Image (cartoon, rainbow, N blue to C red):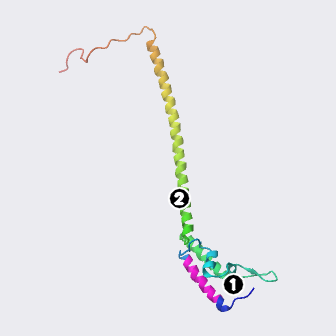
Amino acid sequence: MARISEQTRRNNETAIRQVMDRLLAGDVPPGGKCDIKTLATQAGVARTGFYPKKNRDGSPRPGPYQHLAKEFERRLTELRETGVIPDPRAAQIERLREQLSGLKESLAARDAQIDGLTDFRKRALSQIAAQRIEIERLRDVLAAPSNVRALPNRAGPSAPYGTCS
């Protein structure tokens, strides 16, 4: 594999830093994310340059732009810790997750309320049925022959001993 010249490497690092600043400022291209893949694509460099390599003897060596990948990840982490999400897509996902959590909570509260109202309905119907049975029993007792007599109703309200004036 061919090595790149120092001038090309400096130009690539400058392009990577410019794209890094744009991505972290929230200028994410359509279909892209705020990640190393988009950083490499937008800067016009191979993504493999951001990862460590191996020498022929198997010993690791850093990739040519690995220090920029670490800087990008560090800055991205700092932004996220302060509550800023530069990727609008990631921000939308986070907002939707919070909305989903709120909806799950309100759904659970609604289900608990429905369960409470269902129990109340069962108790109310049971009480109404018991009251109806008691009313029917009292009507049967009243209709059955007994030594109890109903008093006649008097027509019109009148005082038994005259007026109170």
- 124 sits to left or right of 19: left
Query: Which amino acid type is marked by label 2?
Result: Gln
Q: Is residue 20 above or below residue 10?
A: above
| SS at badge 2 | helix
Q: Which residues are magenta?
A: 9-23
Estimate the x, y position of residue 129 in percent, counting from the top left.
50, 26
Q: Which residue is mark 1?
A: 64
Residue at (65%, 92%) from the top-left corner? Answer: 7
Viewer-closest of 58 and 87: 87
10 Å crowding of disc 1: few (<14), some (14-19), many (20+):
some
Estimate the x, y position of residue 98 in percent, counting from the top left.
54, 60
Quadrant of res 143: top left
Which comes sooner in the sequence, label 2 or label 1?
1
Viewer-closest of 53 and 70: 53
Q: Which is the main secondary structure of the residues drawn in magenta?
A: helix
Q: Which residue is mark 2?
A: 99
| SS at badge 1 | loop
Asked if the residues shown at circle 2 and circle 1 are in contact, with their CB atoms under 8 angstroms apart, the answer is no
